[in-house]
Image (cartoon, rainbow, N blue to C red):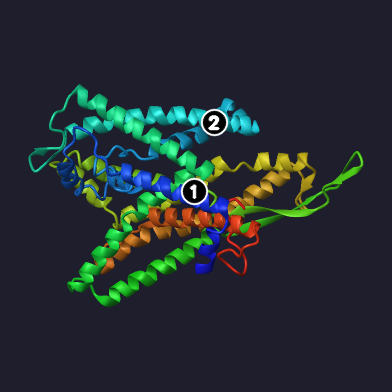
Amino acid sequence: MIQTFQNIFKVPELRKRVLFTLGILVVYRIGSQIPTPGIDAKAMSEFFGQLSGTLFGLYNMFVGGAFEKASVFSLGIMPYISASIIIQLLGAVIPFFQRLQKEGEEGRRKITQYTRYGTVLIAALQALGTSVYLESLNAQGVMVVPNPGMGFKLLTMLTFTCGTIFIMWLGEKITERGIGNGISLIIFIGIIARFPTAVYDEIRLLLSGQRNFFTEIFLVAFMIAVIGAIVLVTRAQRRVPVQYAKRVVGRKVYGGQATHIPLSVNTAGVIPIIFAQSIMFAPSTLTSFFPNSEFMQNIASMFNPGALLYSLVYGLLIVFFAYFYTAIVFNPVDLADNMRKYGGFIPGIRPGKNTSEFIDNILTRITLPGAIFFAIIAVLPYFLMNALNVQFYFGGTGLLIVVGVALDTLSQIESHLVTRHYEGFLKKGKIRGRYS
């Protein structure tokens, strides 16, 4: 493993890409510490300590704690993610976006442009809503915004929106000149930024006698086992054999080879968990606005993380969104049409409609165990925290994102090393990319 990391810096192009990526991530983390003008950062941090189990807590995890510090990067890259998801949803129902998706590179450039416009709009709206919300906050009588008004709203909108645009630019530069997917790496570094603090807190609790040594060993072993299971399921594929007929074009013969279609067990990725968790945090988020309402507090207790109703609804939502998002990003009809266009067919299956139905049936069957597995991974940390009375720092969403992004980045580094005749991270086999 040490030799492999040494080989990374022996390849000039790969070395430049890795160092460029690390430099961009350092810039992002520095920007996450710069406070927004007009906000009392101390009062904001004290108030935010009460919102760890709400939608704001989930948002704060994705932006690496920038939201609770009221930094210029408070909105993070999430407006871009929201705009991308909206464009994908529109591509499933609006013919104009469907045509763009089929126009190749030119269509992708236009979709990227519309995504950027959508990012600016969403970021501006979120910044306006956040500024109004911040003006209403106080921590033990101290106002989070000492001088509220239209000036503060406009300044916050400008600061937060520009911060999101800058982060989007950083992510695109990583994708273009660095290693890995820039947007994913920005979310990744935001999540793991809290890991050193979490390790320090665990060591402090252990040394002070507040935490049992065997409990710590169990937590470490549990995390390693969960990470291994996530890697196994994330990379699991059902390979559908495809045969291409021979075609004679001029004096050349094309086709005639056998290949396969890799259908992933986890086609939707981590999106179903993000959608489901956002919905499940809605009750606790709403009740934070009505602290004196007994009815709202009862609703919040029913949907408290770890409660039976919460876990049941949460798991069902993950399964639902897994099928919903898979149906959006993967179209068996288009795949069958492209196969028929190039003379491809699945042995024993008629091209066209029968092929699309065959692929759809396989995708329906393999999506269910993957969705159930990730539902269990998402719910399990809450039961662990209640059973052992411990804080589990990497819940289902964060852990899945960290593992998925790490595997994608390692697969890209692996391909660079193998291309230049260096050994990769694994001497036997190879790391398969998410879309390999």
Element class at badge 1 = helix
Seen as rendered, the residue at the extreme bottom is 214
As drawn, the residue found furthest toward the right would be: 251
Question: Where residue 245 appears, x then y in whole percent?
Answer: 83, 48
Q: Does residue 250 appear anywhere in the picture? A: yes
At 61% from the left and 63% from the top, the residue drawn is 430
x 65%, y 61%: residue: 421
Check disc 2 and report the residue beneath it.
111
Answer yes or no: is residue 1 visible: no
Residue 22 position within the rendered picture, expressed as x and y whole percent measured from the top left: 43, 50
Q: Which tag, 2 or 1, sits closer to the chain's start?
A: 2
**Looking at the image, residue 330 lies above or below residue 154:** below
Q: Which amino acid does label 1 sit on?
A: Ala
Q: Where is residue 55 in the image (x, y as percent from the top left)?
A: 30, 44
296 or 232, nearer to the observer = 232
Residue 306, quarter of picture:
bottom left
